[in-house]
Every structure is written in C-alpha cells, then in structure tokens.
Amino acid sequence: MSRTPSELSVPDSSDTTLPARNLAVNSSGSVFELDWTLWLFRACLAGAAAAVTLSLSPFGLHGWFAAGLGFALAFVIFLVEHQLKRSPSPGLLGGAIGGLFGALAALLVSAVIARTSEPEATKSFLEYSALLGFGYVGVTLGSRKFGALKPGSLSRLLGVSSGGPSVHADGKLLDTSVLIDGRIAEICEAHFLEGPLLVPQFVLHELQSIADSPDGLRRQRGRRGLEVLQRIQKLQNIEVRIIEDVPGQTGEVDRKLVELALRLRAKIVTNDFNLNKVASVQGIAILNVNLLANALRPAVLPGEGMRVFILREGKEVNQGVAYLEDGTMVVVDAARRLINKTVDILVTSVHQTPAGKMIFGRLDDRSDGSAAMKQAVGGRSERAARPLYPESNAD
C-alpha cells in the first residue's frame, strides 16, 4: 500500500494509539478468517479421504477400518504440510525439480530393467527401489542446493527475468535511527535522494512507542523522529509511502526491516552500525548517513593552519580539545591553559576512526610571535607617549 505525501499524516504522540489499535484489530481479523478457511479445507480433505477409502475398501478393509485408514492418510498429509511450510521457497522449488529429475532417472533405469531376463518379482522390486531411491536423492539434493541460492540467483542463472518490476522499485526504506537523527531531511531538501522513501508501519509504531516513553529524553527523540517525517512529507520533490506490515511477521525491527528489503529489493537508509553490517552480509544496499557526512567533510592536510575554540581539556597532560562545525574533534597539544579561548593551530596529523575523523595539532608559534610583537610595539609606543617629567608638565 502506498500513499502520497498529501494523503499521509503522522499523528503526534497524543493521538497515535488509535491507528495502531485499528491496525491490530484488522490484522487479527484477517488472520482469524484465513485460519478458519484453512481448517475448513483440511476438514473437507479428511472427509474426502475417508469417503474414498470407504468406497474402494483397500487391503480388504471395510467400515470404520477403511474410514480410519482414510483419516490416517489425511493426518500424514497434514504432517507433511506442516514440515513443508517452514521451508524457504527456493528449497521447495529445488525439491520439486529434484524429485522430477529423480523420477525421470528412475524411469530410464526401469526401461533397462524391463529388458532383462529376471523374474517379474525381481523386476518390480528393482523398479520400485529405483523410483524411491532416485526420488529421495533428487528431493534432498535439490532442496539443499536451491535453498543455498540467493533470491534472484536462479533467474540470473537461467537468463530470465525474475518477474515484473516491483511496485516499490528504487525505493529506500527508512530506519528509526535515521528519522530520529534528522539529517535525512536536509539531504532530501538538497535533492541527494531519488525514488520513493518507504516507511514501514513497524517503524512508525516504534517511533510512537519512543514518543510515549516515560523517559523525557526518549520521548523527545521519538517526537523529533515524527516531526522529521512530517517535514519530509511536505517536500514537493520527495514521495513518502507507508508500507503495511506483513501478516504473521514477528521479530525485532531490524530483522523485519532486512526481510522487507529483501522482499521489495529496496535499499535501507540507516545510521545503525550493526544493521549496516547485517544487511550488507545479505547483499542489501545500504545508504549510511554517517558515511555520507564523513565523506563530505573538508579535507585537512598536515601543516595547514586553522582557528579553533578550546572547549575542554584532553585525556593526556596539557591537551586541549576543540570541535569543528561538522563535529570533528581537534586535539591540541599544550592548550589546556587556553580553555574557553580561540587560538590558531597547525595540523600535525589526521586519523580516521570508525566513529569519524580526528585532527591533532599544536599551537601556531607564528601567531603567538606576531601577537607578542604587536604587544611589544604597543607597549613601546605607549611608553613613548607618556611624558618623562609629569611634574614639569603639571607646572
């Protein structure tokens, strides 16, 4: 389900409980209706199996014994269904294809056995053994090999398209962390993002739960995330779509976000370091706002000068710490005595860390020398302006 920015309105923290409650009621109602239909179909299947065995009387069974055999056959079918529905789709497809190839191999072997001079009982035994053996090997190998393939690998291998274009093609899934961070709004305003922005319902629910938190800081962060989403919706060049939850999908938000990205073939926009790693391992394209911010920071080379404000003391002796406008930390040697002052420094080295870039520098002796020279010249001119004999001037 998709909505344009004009159709979607994210409620504030005071009235966000109603949509979540309605969504829960609708989801539970649809699941109940689906289960009721499935169980009715199973009951019809069990009755049909019992009716067939009653009419055919296999193995010389009659009456309740034949009906019991039919119910037992239906129970075995239900067990097989229960095991197969846990298997992934590539595994099921591989098992079916492997079973067909196994049956074909058994048919070829049976054609060879039929031309032998062995007794009919021996031929029948060998034919059934070949059918069961080749069928079992084909199903097990096919499910394992195809289950190890990534989504879309089979289509690329066969040279066919995996289907029509996705409704959310070129979409970007927004994580909770990137909405709370807020810089995504400035990136959208600068036209650095293309394609629709996809916001899953479980991300909205997580923002709502954070906005309703009794902790003041968490409540402020949640409301900020909702405000940022509203700000993005008002942009004319960006389309925001709300993605409905998949019925029966459980787990943490990060896990559901990865599964949704795989299903929609969409990218994920996040600031979460762990989600970045997990999604990258599964072949999902990640747009990390922190990496973008680090890439856009101006390059600083050793020997360059800059003016910084010493904010606090550093970890080492006599060190002072300053910050640039983009948040880059600057460590200045021998600047502890200059806290709360603006000084000129020379960059000595630049270190790249997982958290960002760190700049190390020292005080610029040239600026100190020029300041001392100005002070000395000013002092001499002031002394020269003073009269040598103030008493004679007074007279």
Image (cartoon, rainbow, N blue to C red):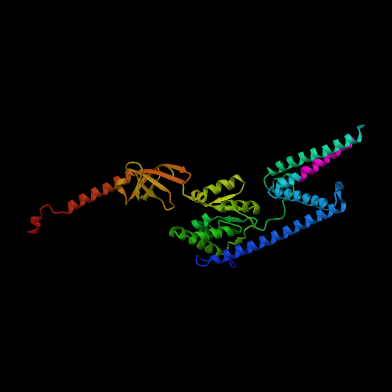
Residue 238: image x %, image y %?
58, 61
Query: Count of labels shown?
Result: 0
At horizontal 44% and vertical 58% (from top left) the residue drawn is 217
Residue 179: image x %, image y %?
52, 57
Q: Toward the viewer: 276 or 300? A: 276
Quarter location, residue 386: bottom left
At horizontal 65% and vertical 53% (from top left) the residue drawn is 263
Residue 140 visible? The answer is: yes
> Is 350 left, or right, of 205 in this rendering?
left
Quadrant assignment for the N terminus: bottom right
Residue 93: image x %, image y %?
74, 47
> Is 314 left, or right, of 183 in this rendering?
left
Vertical order, 384 against 208 (above or below) = above
**Residue 46 on the magenta segment:** no
At horizontal 64% and vertical 51% (from top left) the residue drawn is 262
The span shown in magenta is 96-114
Residue 200 visible? The answer is: no
Residue 195: image x %, image y %?
61, 58
Vertical order, 137 against 313 (above or below) = above
Residue located farthest toward the top when viewing the structure as drawn: 117
Vertical order, 13 against 367 (above or below) = below
Q: Main secondary structure of the magenta part?
A: helix
**Residue 99 on the magenta segment:** yes
At horizontal 41% and vertical 51% (from top left) the residue drawn is 324
Vertical order, 349 against 2 (above or below) = above
> Is 182 left, or right, of 120 in this rendering?
left
Quarter location, residue 316: top left
Q: Toward the viewer: 165 or 363? A: 165
Quarter location, residue 6: bottom right
Quadrant assignment for the C terminus: bottom left
